[in-house]
Image (cartoon, rainbow, N blue to C red):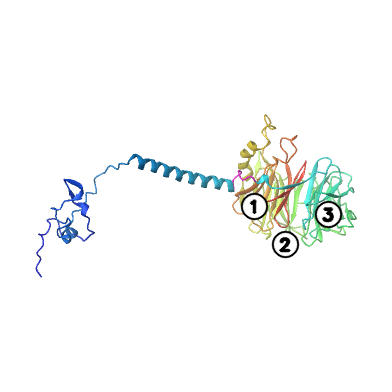
Amino acid sequence: MSYSGPPPYPGPGPQQPGPYNPNAYPNPGNPQQPDPSYPGSPGLNAFYAWTHAPQPDRGKRRKVRFTFKEAVIGLIFLGVLLYMVYGYILATIHLWGPSHASYASQYVNYRGQSIDIFAAALSPDGKYVASGGADKTVQVWDAHSAQLLYTYRGHTEFIQAIAWSPDSKYIASGGQDKTVHVWSAEPGKMGQRVLTYRESPWIISSIAWSPDGQYIVSADTASTKTEVQIWRALTGERITTYTGHQDGVLSVAWSPQGNRIATAGNDGMVQILDALSGQQVARFQYPLDNGKPSFVTSVSWSPDSKRVASAGGDGYVHIWDVDAGREVLKTNVHLSYKEDFEDRLRPENHKGVKPPPVTTRAVSWSHDGKRIVSADNRGATLVWDANDGHLLLYTDGREAPPGRVYTSVTQAAWSQDDRHILITTVDVVVNWQLP
């Protein structure tokens, strides 16, 4: 077959086929139209241009010019894009940071104590709140209506510890009279005393029931003869005494599985005991602060009884793996929150008042194991992710009486359904309903 088209286009070697582009050969007279006299332009052999089109010069820079209208449209588009990015960042901070205004949630306040409150506890069935303090009484409230139901007057000194039995039928209360009273909280039997435990050598600082309701662990704050005692809840029979702490014990917690007890105190140690033998299973030491250990104020178990969270004088919350014998998380959530807190909390009241160093005072693990609530000496109560320490919710003490500049939170504990948190300060007990 003979070829009758134009002669081959001179150039180096065979060309690879490509799409036909009529604008590749501009007409000098009209740059917008192809030159009809140029090989490969419309009207000539298209196959010739397709196989022999010259390659564009890729090394040249070209000026890109925009009309005024195009520039305005571009700026508008860029502004919208930046606004969307800013909105996303703001929403993220709102979700995870202190700007999430959870303090606006609903509260129920229990203000019946005539003077300072030192302890409070929510019954496991969620129906009642018990509180006690410097007026030497324990008061029992309806958790929902905040109506005072009963006042127990069996103690002769300040009350510093309160705990409900797992079935919500009994209350154990202890304090500066060195005794623990166990008494009924059932309707019709409210206030009937079951026993008074008098074996403690010093002021009762903390009480916890075993998960089966058969035993109570109580601890004292003595600096010399510190004891943790385990005894039968309804008979007072002492099972064992532990003396491994070097200073007063401030918190005790029974593991959900029932086989271990966590203790913590002024010696800066978190210790894990076998529940019935009293033998030490593990111990964790807080770092030294100016040559002295930071005190530990509160301990709480994870629902699977594998980890313990602790709060104390260093301002952090620590999480310890009991079986591995090591720390698995140390969160500075309270230290990172403090600057925001100082700006938000009653600026008209704390002008000229130097805030105290941050101390975490209370810690409690949610029953679903996903969250931890902790509280500090400036009135902040924070809910955060138990796995990575991200702040989720907070309340900053705005419900406290305005006469106090900073009101320390001494206790914070979850309800059984994880929908409420009971917050105890020296001024008021608050049932915080979570959003």
Q: Nearer the viewer, mark 3 or mark 1?
A: 3
Task: Report helix, strand or loop for mark 3.
Answer: strand
Foreground residue, 46 or 229?
46
Q: How many marks?
A: 3
Q: Is residue 53 magenta?
A: no
The 10 Å Cα crowd at callout 1, few under 14, some 14 to 19, many 20 or more, is many
Q: Nearer the viewer, residue 158 or 115?
A: 115
Seen in the image, is 151 located left or right of residue 358?
right
Residues in magenta, as a range:
96-101
Q: Earlier in the sequence, mark 3 or mark 1?
A: 3
Give the labeled residue for mark 1.
Answer: 319
In terms of secondary structure, where does tag 1 sit? strand
- The kind of residue tagged 3 is Ile
Left or right side of 12 for 85: right
Q: Quadrant of the N terminus?
A: bottom left
Tell whether label 1 touches label 3 (CB within 8 Å): no
Residue 183 placement: quadrant: bottom right
- Residue at 59% x, 52% y is 388
Q: Disc 1 residue type? A: Ile
Give the image location of residue 190, x and y in percent.
Answer: 88, 55
Where is residue 18 shown, x and y percent of the image? 23, 59
What separation in Å lies between label 3 and label 2 (alpha carbons)? 21 Å
Q: Nearer the viewer, mark 3 or mark 2?
A: 3
Position of 221 compared to 334: left or right? right
Using the image, tell me which numbered label, if any, was put on residue 257.
Answer: 2
Which residue is labeled 3 in the image?
A: 171
Q: Amino acid at mark 2?
A: Gln
Secondary structure predominantly adopted by residues drawn in magenta = loop
